[in-house]
Image (spheres, grey):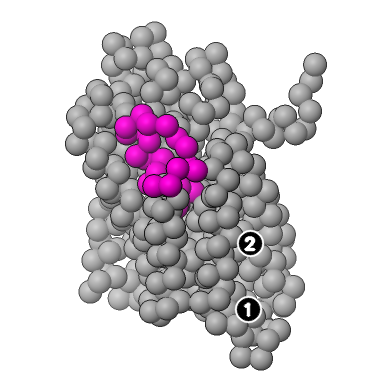
Amino acid sequence: MKLTLSKKIQTFLPGIFLIGFNIGTGSVTAMAKAGADYGMSLLWAMLLSCWVTYFLIVTYGKYTAVTGETALYAFRKHLHPSVGIFFIIALTVAVCGSIIGVMGIIADVCAEWSKTFVDGGIHSVWFAGFFILVVYILFWNGRTRFFQKALALIVGIMALSFIINFFILMPKPLDIVKGLIPSLPQIPMDIDKGPFLVVASIVGTTVASCIFIVRTTLVKEAGWTIQDLEIQKKDARLSAFMMFIISGAIMAAAAGTLYVSGLGLTKASQMVTLLEPLAGRFAVTIFVSGIVAAGVSSQFPNVLLLPWLICDYSQSERDMTMGRYRIMVALLSILGLIVPVFKAPPVIIMIASQAFGALVLPATVLGILYLTSRKKIMGEFVSSWKMNIIMGCIFLFSIYMSINSIKGLSALLS
């Protein structure tokens, strides 16, 4: 009997969850800034990042399907407890920056957009408080399946918004094709800190360590085993493909408007103020809808990450209705008020956070390379020499991106 459409969608819920986690306002900011500052010339970096993301999603998912072990527990068991603790600390630091930046960007964009309808606009603090409350209400349910279904709806709204915007604002098709050819824009490093930080942020927001760690939890909760490896691959393909399509649509919208007009991007509200004269109110409204959906879809797993990491490491019950987790998520959520209250620059915080994430990536690749290469752990599903060569290349790529992150962050702080 053929699966109904609803059941087919449910089969891909783990992958859709990762799309929501991955494509947040960090991605919107990084892709929009790349498009506004450099046109489509960095599209190749995003395509490569999505391919690497697919490969690592499959590898981490396969490990759990074969062994039944989640990532941090495996690091603790087969490497050393300190490795698992390192990931908890590093990913929590990165996600705190993301929480601050995500809500700051949503609030700033909505506040600017509200000026179209309300004289003087609505203060960003009210928008931040509202969306923090929405995310926390969704979290209160506590069930992973509910989380996945809620995120699937939000991701659908986000994808539709940005794809519609792509067709309204798209650049020349030839520019899109040229963007797939690897190159770095010839922009002096003293102009908006150069392309290094933007490239690192594209990689950091796409090839994000947290989604690979969380992938193992989702695979285990889905009950996938070695018999489900093909389903796991299809789910990963859909996830990586949609990441590329949505991110590409965002970059193209900025490239087709801000870049061709010679307008760069330095703060979130510019996405509204600069786009409206070029694209019209309808396109801006669609874009704002996409940003809000992207922000909520990433903020939700952002605040979930620390409790899930703790459960992963300790192999404790993953019950998000427990009081300690609700308090933990409430405290993390409050970080979203930092930008509206203290007027911190959300785009800079967001890009720096994503670039910092790229620094954690080499350890993420090295850890799973070690685990999947051990026959004692993987049995007949141990990685082949071809897979290990690919993983080795990805490790070198991650080192290169970490170097770019350091260069970009140094330029940002100078």
Q: Residue at x 23, y 66 (%)?
A: 410
Name the secondary structure under disc 1.
helix
The residue type indicated by label 1 comes to: Trp
Q: Position of residue 88 (x, y in %)?
A: 30, 44
The residue type indicated by label 2 comes to: Gly
Q: Position of residue 242 (x, y in %)?
A: 60, 44
In the figure, residue 335 lies in which quadrant? bottom left
Q: Residue at x 37, y 31 (%)?
A: 316
Q: Residues within 10 Å of mark 1 (few under 14, many from 20)?
A: many
- Which residue is identified by label 1? 113
Q: Position of residue 364 (x, y in %)?
A: 31, 38
Q: Residue at x 43, y 47 (%)?
A: 323
Q: Residue at x 34, y 54 (%)?
A: 94
- Which residue is identified by label 2? 290
108 vs 135, nearest the viewer? 135
Residue 185 appears in the figure: no
Question: In the picture shown, does residue 262 fall above or below 363?
Answer: below
- Nearer-N-terminus badge (2/1): 1
Looking at the rendering, the stretch of residues picked out in magenta corresponds to 301-324
Examine the residues drawn in magenta and state their main secondary structure. helix
Q: Locate the N terminus and report the quarter of the image it occupies.
A: top right
90 vs 271, nearest the viewer? 90
* 322 magenta-colored: yes
Residue 367 appears in the figure: yes
Name the secondary structure under disc 2.
helix
198 vs 211, nearest the viewer? 211
Q: Position of residue 152 (x, y in %)?
A: 64, 45
Left or right of 264? Residue 260 is right
